[in-house]
Structures are given as structure tokens and as C-alpha cells.
Amino acid sequence: MLIRYGYEITIQCTQPTALVCLLSINEQRAADIRAPETVWTNPGIATTTYHDMFGNICRRMVAPAGDLTIWGDATIWDSGLLDEIALGAREIPVPDLPDECLVYLMGSRYCETDRLSQAAWDLFGQLPPGWSRVQAICDFVHDHIKFDYMQARSTRTAFEAFNERIGVCRDFAHLALTLCRCLNIPARYVNGHLGDIGVPVVDPMDFSAWIEVFLEGKWHTFDPRNNTPRIGRIVVARGRDAADIPLINSFGPHLLKSFRVWTYEVEGV
């Protein structure tokens, strides 16, 4: 199947302001691109790209004073298959983990492993290790947190989400991956496009957040917000938590004026 995805974001700055934007899809999907990403800004300004420490594509620019619109659009091929389920996937003991996984065991800006460690072991420590334990964590988070856009807060941490029991997809992701890390299971934060393909359409469309967990020698997708396999995930960026991969990181104040995202299946082969 083919999926068209994109975004249109307008911000306002009071003075020229440096930006780093993580809006382009991860290069692991480069071979699947069918209509290359087109990016433009209004007014037109120069942009450059680089890769951060996690391998994400970052776009640098300097927003002028006033309004700036950033627009991107592309089409990608997708298998049309649901997220993989690997019920027999085992946890890997910490001494045997690859070096690059160790950072995803540690606390980070929004993921206070020190404050949630006891709760994690009390809730899940006696469960059989492996896929089923990670799924139990996602089941708990899915049921524990009430989804509410009107209660979104950019500073909410995993510990706060655990106690407030409310949030948006990033809060579901932060809490689930923190509980995994507390149990010595590497887990990382992912944001990207997830269209309503094969499920009822929910508007307005937005970027989505989920997690990847390292089991049986590879990274597996889990989605505590939706908590069901989905079709057509398009990864934009991965990191320890949302602090590593903001859509727009501005080095100065800015005001978000409009925000539009699209992800949908299109005709083609």
C-alpha cells in the first residue's frame, strides 16, 4: 500500500530565532519512499540538515521575525501488515545487552526510573519475563491513564502521569518505557505518523508517540496509548524521551499559530 503523509506548521517569532526541527522520517525507511519529501517554508529561508546522536534527521534554520510556515509532504510504500507480535521474545540479561542499549535503561528528563522503580517491581516483578511482561505493562498504562487532549502538559513526567492518571500519547509512552527500564528492559521513545488505517477515523490528525522495547536481540513496537497492533507506522525520530526529539526546538521564544498533520492511504501499488 501507499501512504501519503505530511505536515503544515506555522509559528510566530518576535525576532530572528534559530530552530532545529525533527520532522523528516527516519532514514531506515529511505528505500520505501515513492514520492520524495518536499519541504518548503514561507517565507522562503535557507535550511540545512544533519544527523543527531540517535541517527535522526534534523533540519536547521533561522526563523525570521513574524510568521513562518514549515510544510512537508511525501509518499511511502508500506507492507500494510499489522505491527509484529512476538509472544516468545525473551528479555536479555543486562550483562549480555549490546552497548548501545544501555542508555535506554537509564533515567532521563521525563522518565524518572528512581521514583518509579519500587512501583514497577511491586506491579510487574513477579510476572514471567519477556514479551508478556512488557504487554502487561502496556495493558496497565493503557487502563491507568485517561486520554485527554485538553489536559496535555509539555512538562508532565512519567511519575506525574502515574499519579495524575491523565495525559496524551507521549505520557502513555513515557510511563510505559519508564516501567520497562525499571525492570532492566531497554525501552526508547518514538514519534512519527500513524494514520487511521483499518480503524475508525479520528480527527484532527496529529503526530503520534509510542515505544520500542529490546527483546530477543531486536527492537519491537509497543503502543500503550492504542494498545493494539496497527497498520502503517512511519517513524520520524527515536530518543530516550520526548526531550531528545521535539518536533521544533527553538533557541528563543515562539508562538504556535497553526498545526496540521495528514497521514492516509492513497491509490497505487
Image (tube, rainbow, N blue to C red):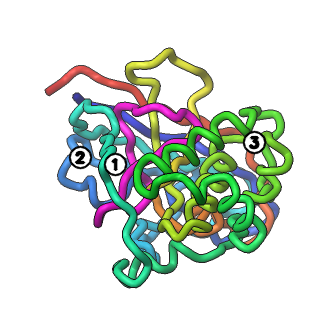
Residue at 24% across / 37% down in the picture?
78
Q: Which of these two is toward me, 13 or 168? A: 168
Q: Which of these two is toward me, 226 or 60? A: 226
Q: Are marks 1 and 2 in contact (CB under 8 Å)?
A: yes
SS at circle 1: strand
Distance CA(mark 3)–CA(mark 1): 31 Å
SS at circle 2: strand
**Chain-order first, disc 2 or disc 3:** 2
Instruction: Classify 119 as above or below 76.
Output: below
**Chain-order first, disc 3 or disc 1:** 1
Badge 3: how crowded within 10 Å, few (<14), some, or many (20+)?
many
Residue 37, given in percent of the width and then of the height, sits at: 34, 48
On the rendered image, what quadrant is the N terminus found in? top left
Residue at 62% across / 26% down in the picture?
204
Residue lying farthest to the left in this orientation = 269
Residue at 44% across / 46% down in the picture?
132
- Identify the amino acid type marked 1: Glu
Could one spot residue 46 in this view of the protein?
Answer: no
Residue placed under numbered mark 2 in the picture:
33
Residue placed under numbered mark 3 in the picture:
167
Residue placed under numbered mark 1 in the picture:
37
Q: Name the image quarter holding residue 87.
A: top left
Instruction: Classify 73 as above or below 158.
Output: above
